[in-house]
Every structure is written in structure tokens, then in C-alpha cells.
Amino acid sequence: MLPHAGAGPASGFGAFVARARAAGTLVVQPRMGMADPLRMRDGLRATRDADAVTVGTVTLDSYTRTGDLDAARRALAEGVGLNGYPIATHPADTTRTVLRGVMDARFPVQVRHGSAMPEHIVRALLAVGLDATEGGPVSYCLPYSRTPLREAVTAWQRSCELLASMREYGAEPHLETFGGCLMGQLCPPSLLIAVSVLEALFFRQHGLKSVSLSYAQQADPRQDEEALTVLARLAGELLPDVDHHVVLYAYMGVFPRSPGGARLLLQDAARLAVRAGAARLIVKTTAEAHRIPTVGENVRALETAAAAAADERARPALSAAPGTSGSGTAGPCATTATAAVPGTGTDTGIEAEARALIGAVLELDADIGRALVRAFAAGYLDVPYCLHPDNAGRARTSLAPDGRLLWSSVGSMPIAGLAADGPRPPILGSAGLISALSHVQRTYDDRAADPSALTAAADPPRPPDPPRPHVPLRPPVLTRPPVPPRTTSTPRRELGPTTP
């Protein structure tokens, strides 16, 4: 049973997840946002009352995300549908009513938004008593906007400082980096890890003491497990003075079209989260390939994920298949520096690449925001298939037949040769790219069509790759183009009674 938390930092978003993790429980969370306050309140209540340990989500609409508040006001006045909750447009008292009697220490709520320039959003969420949100200067700029990266960094610095100012009033605001997601798919794990860690370091530099580091499920569970292990290890090393946890996103690319395939993919995400020590899982529903899910579909997804996580925790460690982490895990949801991370016995070079990328950026400037701007200008960070003007656009990836993501071209990133195991795969053409984008959808729809898949192990055995030595985090010797000039399922009852 998770201990009750009173007012103050112990009742914050990060503290809630820490208590769940200590109890050996995976926290599950939906994506959910409705413009109508009554529907938003009902969605939060349904999330709270699901047969799972949950946190709530208020996802904002596109007008609010882009700062077009006049358009949001017109839409509300004219009854035009919005694709999320307009927190900066509804009166603060309206949103406080949405949250009253629903949000408390046993059910924290996070605002999700997607904005490269989030100051107006942070001010609005703080005004209604919320202090948990997510994003980042890179991860909510390059994939989602044309905003110059330099401007996004400045806006995110001010937003972090606004959030951190709440610590003066006894709160412990929480900020989750979206850096482990970026384009959502076809981005090799080392870059996801590097951006996730660098954004978390940016948050800490600007006053945050409670953060989470994200990673998006990709196409190969063993590669993902290795990546999550590395992410937790680096977070423990580089954020030792910050409360932090790892959050896994269920697959963000083309989702299976069949309900059975979508359910299998979500179950595999939950099992991966448990094996690899993630503390929280952002779920997807069986409706993802077709439409925006209903509240009921979100609740079923939360309960499906919680049940799969409980099943994975219950698997005897010694009977786990080779290549999975049934052994070597410190706890069912172990993570951060205070608990060991699972050892899969596999090292394919993800850690060496992630350390090289992080080291290269940190070498550029003591101010992490300036370092990020300079790193993208020099191509030391380069997001595949991202068309933002500040992205070099030289990196390319390929998908191996087993689903592993591989670099076809690393551009100017300082990772050439660190994970080389033969010639690089060719750069994908249009047909190959379309095939790679639909790989997960085809795989899981095919599994769902095979009755034996319903009882098969989530991750079939595969011989582990040969181990590689641990690579210390040292800034690499950079031999790239000149750097630009410096710029100035546990049921809810285990949480204790909730407010009706």
C-alpha cells in the first residue's frame, strides 16, 4: 500500500511516481484532452477510478499549443470542436472546478501540450494549481514547429524558471523531457537517450529538482530494453541530486489496425517497462489507427497495460527466456541511481554512442541551452527525417529485418565507428521508408491473426550480442567541422481512499 502524502513536495507528481515505484507498481497514464470542462472532468475521474495505478492527463488543443489564443476563444464561442483542453482560454475558476475533488496527492495530473514556446501555458497551469508538465527546448521545437531553436531554448529557460519558482511555496514542480521521443519512430536509441538526458540537464540547470526522462518504444524489444537500461544508468550518473524516473511511451508510429494487434503491442510495451525498470508508461488504445479514442477506450488501455505489467512482474525470474531480463533486475520497477537497472547481457554500442553525443554537447558550452544550439548548428546532433531549418538533415536510418534501428548515415555526429558491426545499411528510398514506417503495424496485425500469438511469450528468445566494455563519459575528441562561435496493475484502492 502506498503511503499517504500530505501537502508540500511529498505530494507532487514525482513523489507519487516514486512511491508507486517503491511499491513495485508501474504507473500508467493516458493521452486525454477534451475542450468541454465537464467532459474533461469526467475523463479525469474515469482515469482515477481505473483498476490501475494512474496519473491524470490534461492534453491541450492545437491553438493553445501554438499560442493562437484568439482562435481558441473564437472556437469556444462558436461551439467549434477543439482537439484538446484550452487551459489558457477557459477561466481559471473553470479549470479549478474541473480539478476540484479529483486531483489530490493520490491522483496527480500532468499537462501535455507540444509547444515550442510554452510560457503562456506554464503561467496558465500554475494559476489553476497544477505544477507538472512536459516537453523540452529541442523535442517540442524541431519535430513540431518552425520556431528557431535559439528562440525555443530561451522560452523554455523562462518556462523552467517559472515552474521552479513554485518551490518557494512548498511545491515540487515536475517536468518531463520529451527528448526520448523526437519524431516518434525511426530514430536510433542513442540519439533519443542523448536528447532526453541533455534536456533533463537543461531543466536542472534552470532550477527543476524533479524530472522524468522519456523513451519511445521502437520496433525491437531487446534494443529497447538495452536503451532503457542505458538511459537509467546515465540519468543516475548525471542527475544524482535530482528526483527522477524513466517514462516509456507505447509505440508512437503507425499503430496496428486490428484491435488484437493494438492490444498485443500495448501489452508488450507494459512488459518492456517492467523488465527495463521504467516507472511510468504512456499508453495507447485499440482505436489509435482510426480515430481519437473515447474515455472508455482509454480506461481499457490503462487496465490492459496494468494487467500485463502485473503478469510480467509475476513471471519467475529463473524461467525467463534467454535475452530477456528475468534475472538481474533489482525490483519490478527499479530505476534511477538508487536502484540497479536490469542487465540484459547485451551491448550493441548504444551506450558508447549516447555517451559520445552527450559528451560532445557538454563540451561546447557550460550553458546547456547555448550548447544545444551550437550542437545542432555543427551537426553534432542531427534528427533523422526532421525538416526543421535548424536540423542538419544528414542523418539517416534503416530498419533491420528483426526490427533493430541502425544508422545508415551519421552525418557529422561524433559516433562514427562506435557501434560498427559491418558495413552500414543503405539509405532507405521512398518504398523502403514506407515499409519501415509500417513494420510494427504489419508485425502486430499478423501476430493478432495467429491464434498462437495470444499465448506466446511477449519477446521470443534471441542470442545476446557479445558484450562490450563499459565506456566512461568523457568528452570525445571532435574532428568535425569547426564549431560555430559561442553565443551569449495494482488497483487504485492500494493508494488509499480518493476524494469522491
Image (cartoon, rainbow, N blue to C red):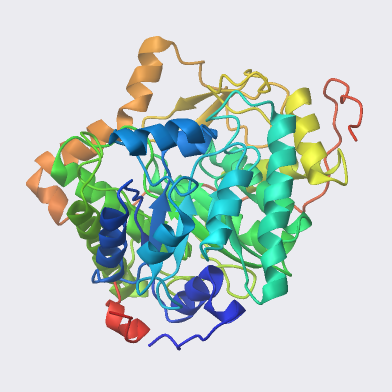
Residue drawn at point x = 73 percent, y = 23 percent: 412
Q: Residue at x 32, y 86 (%)?
A: 497
Query: Front-most of 475 and 378?
Result: 378
Residue 40: image location, x then y, percent: 31, 55
Residue 152, horizontal then vertical, whole percent: 68, 35
Residue 271: percent from the left, percent from the top? 34, 60
Residue at (36, 26) in percent of width and height:
437
Residue 297 visible to an observer of this rendering: yes
Quadrant in which the N terminus appears: bottom left
109 lies above or below 4: above
Eyeballing the image, is 164 above or below 33?
A: below
Which residue ends up furthest to the left in the rendered image? 451
* Horizontal side, residue 426 vs residue 32: left or right: right
Q: State left or right for residue 108 relative to residue 165.
A: left
Residue toward you, 389 or 247:
389
Name the image quarter holding the C terminus.
bottom left
For this rendering, which residue is in front, 262 or 37? Answer: 37
The spot of residue 169 in percent (x, y) is: 68, 74
Q: Is residue 464 visible?
A: no
**Where 327 falls versus 200 (above or below)?**
below
